[in-house]
Amino acid sequence: MRAVDVIMHKRGGAELSREEVAFMIEGYTSGSLPEYQISAWLMAIFFQGMSPRETADLTDLMLHSGDVMNLGGLRGPNGRVGPFVDKHSTGGVGDKVSLILAPIVAACGIQVPMMSGRALGHTGGTLDKLESIPGYKTGLSEAQFRDFIAADGFAMTGQTAKIVPADKKLYALRDVTATVESIPLITASILSKKVAEGAEALVFDVKTGPGAFMKTLEDSEALARSLVDTGKAMGKRIVGVITDMSEPLGAMVGNFFEVEESLDCLEGKGPSDLMEVTMRLSAWMLVAGGLAATVEEGIAKCEAALATGKPRELFLANVKRQGGDVEKMLQLRGKFRSAHTRKLGAKDSGFITGIDAYKIGLAGVYLGVGRDKTTDPVYPDVGFIFHHKVGDAVKAGELIAEVYGKDEASLEAARGLIEDSLSIGQARLPARPLILKEITAL
Ligand code: URA
């Protein structure tokens, strides 16, 4: 087989055989094929797409480029094996759902093997949020990952170098060859990593809107369908939920700020938008794990669990188990704020018609919430606290948000974006639904 023939087949719109896809993936990961041929192949996929069968082959071949976690036989805190269910978000601003959802569903009897990512570009990262808790460690060994799931029903770790090494090389190449925004390539990249962590069912939160990776409902739906169909082809039970990401989720954006808001949610004091998305996704995890027959029953079970206080206890137990200082975390609540701060006030009286999540996320990179490059540092005590959200009536000069930056220069650099993110009109816009579409393969 020759790489040039495989490139030519894809360039002409042919469906590649599994052997052809394997030749390219194995050749690239072993170093026998050069980057220029893989780049050309990726661009051909970008324009011609891939059939569901090709996407499933690509995902499976990428998955087996590294280790696949075997959770078989692992007993959770209730003494039962599984069900192992995880949730993955395509990335948003103020999206701290994982921190709240994992202990809620664990309290209901789901085991959650959660492998998360870091902030990159305008979107936040679960690992950075957790590491803002003094002492918290996210680089768990496989043995710790298993032990912690057995103890609390969930554990939170990062992806090791051994999980889908093909994706690390391919993603870096896609980043510099303008081939990131391809549905089959995104599907294979996300799904291979999620399947490698050992879950038997997966719930995908596919964000849509200005603050999302996919800006239009049409593109988000195409990605959700591809994730669901490919996941099903790989023998997993899958749910894709498309949720709104036009304004930040909840009232807080920032690493420790989002830990604080997660604790509020676990104490029954969470903002309604964040709670609605969290409960819906949690409920789907129960359905996917066979612990609820319908999403409504799942929501009722999650609400009942939350009311017992058990999810908060499990969250604190997990913080302690992963090296975090629970006392210090609780003491820092409401106080862990950078000294470099500004207030964002309303320029006019009227109704808030938009808080652009993309601009807030980008401003967050200047402030020190997120990062441009994977090697940039992030800061725990910076970000935004919103006092108003879209739909609220405000008076000129009224406080909309507190902004915290790593230094004065960062606040100046972010100022234009923050001011531009806010729009005020004379009429209240109808509330946007948060849950836009649900696609299931159960
Ligand atoms: N996230 C991933 O992990 N991979 C992609 O290709 C895009 C987003």
Image (cartoon, rainbow, N blue to C red):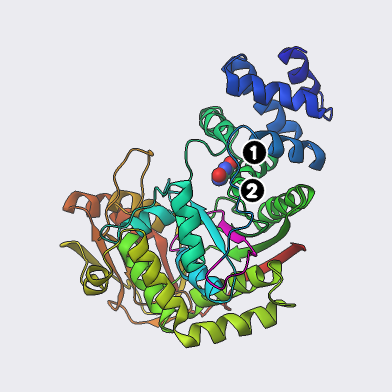
Q: Nearer the viewer, residue 415 or 339?
A: 339
Three-letter amino acid code of the residue under disc 1: Leu
**Number of the label disc, if any, that sits on residue 55:** none
The residue to which callout 1 is attached is 63
Residue 279 location, x and y as percent? Answer: 57, 76
Q: Which label's residue is closer to the chain start, 1 or 2? A: 1
Instruction: Point out the image quarter for the C terminus.
Output: bottom right
Asked if one can make out residue 264 in the rendered structure from this viewpoint, the answer is yes
The range drawn in magenta is 76-94
Q: Residue at x 68, y 50 (%)?
A: 223
Q: Quadrant of residue 22?
A: top right
Q: Let me know if residue 171 is in the magenta part.
A: no
Residue 41 location, x and y as percent? Answer: 68, 23
In the image, residue 348 sits, relative to residue 12, either above or below, namely below
The residue to which callout 2 is attached is 195
Q: Do residues under tags 1 and 2 come within 8 Å of each other at their CB atoms?
A: yes
> Could you tell whether 62 is left or right of 305 in the image?
right
Asked if one can make out residue 434 in the rendered structure from this viewpoint, the answer is no
Q: Residues within 10 Å of mark 2 (few under 14, many from 20)?
A: many
Residue 272 location, x and y as percent? Answer: 49, 80
Q: Residue at x 33, y 82 (%)?
A: 395
Q: Nearer the viewer, residue 85 or 337?
A: 85
In the image, residue 221 sits, relative to residue 36, either above or below, namely below
Three-letter amino acid code of the residue under disc 2: Val
